[in-house]
Every structure is written in C-alpha cells, then in structure tokens.
Amino acid sequence: MFRLFLIFLSCFTASALHAQDYWDLQRCIDYAFQNNITVLQTKLGIDRAEIDRNQSRFNLLPDLNAGANHGYNWGQRIDPFTNTFASERVRSNNFFVGAGLDLFNGFNKMNVVRQREADLEAGRYDYETMQNDIAMQIALAYLQVLLNEENVVISENQVAITKEQAERMKRLVDGGAEPLGSYYDLVSQQAQEELNLVNSQNAVTLSKLNLMQLLQLSQNDAPEFTVVKPDFDDVGMELISSTSDDIYRTAKSTLPQIRAAESRRRSAEFALDASRGLLYPTISVSGAVGTGYSGINQEPVGEPSTVFQPIGVVAGTGETVITAVPVTDFRTKSFSDQMSDNFNQNVFINLSVPIFNGAAARSNTDRAKIAQIEADLNYTDVSNRLRFDVEQAYADAKAALNSYMAAMKAVEAFEESFKYAEIRYQQSVINVVDYNNIKTQYAVAQSNLVNAKYDFVFRTKILDFYLGKAITF
C-alpha cells in the first residue's frame, strides 16, 4: 500500500512539474519577435521598401508592350491598309509589339534606385530599432515579475514570523504570563501582513499578465506561465568603470537608429540628384512592329475574261463601235496573306527638352533640398538625443548602484537589530508594539533592497544595450 502511495505521489509530482511552462528572458524576446504586433507591422515596412527598390530597378529596363484589336467600321473612311475609301461595313484587325528605352534622362532613374536602396536600408534599421525597444520593454516587464515574486517571499516570511510569535503569545496568555491585549496586537499584525501578502501575490499576477500581453501570449496558450529567475550576483558592476563618453561613442557606431538616420540622409541626397535629373533633356529610343487585316483588301481570282461593250457610234454611217473590256473576279485577301503583306517596322530616336512645365521640376528640386536639410537635422537630433539618453542612463546606473549598496547596508543593520529585538522580546524586555515596529522596519529594508537590486540590474541592461550587447540575464 505504501509503495502504491509513493508511485502515485511521484506521478503527481512529475505531472505538476510538467505543467509548469518555464520562460527565460531569451525565450520571451524570441517569442515577441515572432508574434508582437508592433514588430510585425514594422517588418511590413521592409516588405514595402523592397517592392519600391525592385520597381526602381525594373524601371531601368526597356518598356515592352503588345496589343491587338478587332472591330467593325460603318460609314465613309479611308482604309489604312488599302488606302481606298470604304463606305460599307468593314472588319479590321491590328496587332503590334512596341518597345522603348531611355538612353539618357539626367541619371534620374539611377538616382531613384540608389534612393530606394537607402530607404530599404533605413527600414531594416528601423526594424532592428523596434526589436531593441520591444526587447527592453520585455526585460523591464520580466524584472518586474521577479521583483514582485521576491516581495511575495518577503511577505510570506513576515507572515510566518508573526504567526509563530502569535502562537507563542497565545501560550503565554493562556498561562497568565502576558495580557490578552498583546496577543490581539500580534493577531492584528498578522492580518495586516496577510493582506500585504495577498497584495504582493496580486502584483505578481498583474506583472505576469503585462509581460504576456507584450509577448502577445494568451493565458490559454500558457496557463502555467513561469519566469526563470537568473543569478544577479555582481551584475553590471564593471560597467560603471566606463565613462559616458566611451559608451556614447560605442552606441553611436552600433545602434540601428543612428544608422537609420544616416541611411535617410543618403536617401535625401539621392532624391535631390534624381529631381535635378528632370531638368535635363531626355533621349530615348523606341521601336515597334505591327501588322493588320482589312475586310476590303481584295485580290483577283483566276484568269481575266473579255467582254465586248459598245462605246459609241460612227458618224455618218451609224455603225456601232465595240471595244473589248477585261473582266476580273475579286475576293477578300486571306488573313495569313494580309498578316505577311501588312507587316511593318519602325524605329525612332526621341529627344525631349524641358522648357517650361509650370516650374514643376524646379519646385520638386526645391522640395528635395528642404528634405535633405530635414534629414541632416534629424540625424543631428538623433545623435544629440542618444548622447542625452546615454548620459542619463549612466547617471541613473550610478545612482542605482549607490542606492543598492546603501540598501544592502540598511538590511544588514536592520537584520542585526531584528535579531536583537527577537531576543529582547522573548525575554520580555520590549513589548509587542516595539517588536512589531522593528520587524516592520526590517521588512521595509528588505523590500527596498529588492527594489534597488532590480532597478540597478535594469539600469545596467540599458548600458549593455548602448554598448551593443544582447539583452540577457
């Protein structure tokens, strides 16, 4: 019977462990990159930029078009294939293939290709920037879960200590050694700490929900969502030895938002060159081949015959004058013969000189100059904001480190104070109110240490990000 109980217990434990769905930071980030709506929307921008780039390349190739028509005409007209007047209903067909190629257009199309390639490059850097932003948001949400879970542990410890003290006090009260009011003071303290524990547990639930929403992960897909707690010993201590200038120089050479701004500067330069190309003459070559069919295009059938017809009378004798008139039968020329007979070709070299077009080309060039200035200003603005963000992040990290070190000292001090208070309380040197005050101060110090630790970890992750390192724990 005992063996069956052990087997059942082991199976239950294995099932419970299997039900836990453990997520470390890297898994969270990878999942978000595949499912986060904002990331997916940004990736669509790359797809559009690729289409625009490919289209600009195709625009360098010759135009090639083919066409055909089939129709009927009524009324007086000159047939284009027989060059004769026709008044009855005439069927006609026309077929053609034409091609054209720009030989010179001020390098407009070549510069448009370069512009689209720079736009595509900027789009890819935007995608990397969005991935970095999402990864940073996930890291913050991930740390918030860990922080709240540690606060739960602190609250559980406080409840356990108070519960133990309340049970001890109950025995003393029953023995007449302590007044009943001291027991009720501990019971009320325990109730307050149990409320704090419930609030801490609720905070864990809400922080997990926030993280899952960032991942676009539903609770049905991961009902036992559990984050992995990494080892944070001495995390980021070596980063504080670097200077903010060192971090800024590294960030400026590696971060995608800077490269995106650089790509947009080049795009604006190429757009300006492309607009200037429209001010130059355009030389192009075009050609076409075609053929057609006409319903009034006739051809003779067989050998001609002779018909004698009177053409007049001889004066004086009254004798009729007769002449021989050849008669030939005709039929509509066959479709295949007309396709061959009417086949034609043409080649043209075209020159177009822009003289006046409502100043549209000049206005486009002026707008392109303004866009180039805007791109330069945007690059400067992104660089300046990066410097400010790096300096702010560096200062925040140093401040977080100082807070972390101070919080550790405070916990060490309050821990000794609490140990001493426990001894004095058990010896009835201090009352329950003083004991609870010291215990509460110790709990607050522990909570402050946990907050300072995770704040420092997050600040160092920001510095890692600016140094071009992957966001990992």
Image: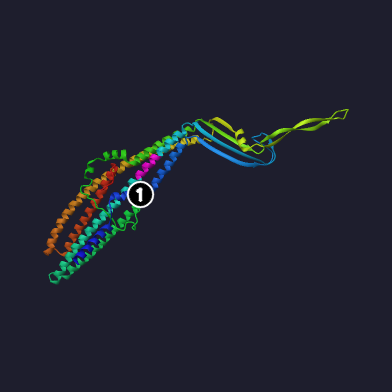
Q: Give the dominant element type of the magenta stretch: helix, strand or loop.
A: helix
Which one is nearer the viewer's eye here, 57 or 464? 57
Q: Is residue 86 above or below residue 189?
A: above
- Residue 260 is left or right of residue 343, and the answer is left
Badge 1 crowding class, 10 Å Cα cut-off, few under 14, some 14 to 19, many 20 or more, is few
430 relative position to 307: left or right: left
| Type of colouring | rainbow
* Residue placed furthest toward the left: 427
Residue drawn at 46 percent across, 37 percent down: 58
- Residue 343 picture location, percent across and down: 59, 33
Residue 247 falls in image quadrant: top left
Quarter of the figure with the N terminus:
bottom left
The residue located at (21%, 45%) in the rendering is 237
Question: In terms of secondary structure, where does tag 1 sit?
Answer: helix
Q: Quadrant of residue 72?
A: top right
Identified by mark 1, the residue type is: Gln
**Is residue 125 highlighted in magenta?**
yes
User: Considering only vertical position in the picture, is 23 above or below 338?
Assistant: below
Residue 346 placed where, x, y %? 57, 31
Mark 1 lies on residue? 34
- 228 up-or-down from 167: above or below: above
**Which of 246 and 473 lies nearest the eye of the viewer?**
473
- Residue 122 lies in the magenta stretch: yes
Report if residue 47 is visible in the image. yes
> Which quadrant of the figure has residue 442?
bottom left
Residue at the limit of the structure toward the right, as seen here = 316
Residue 396 in view in this figure: no
* Magenta-colored span: 120-129
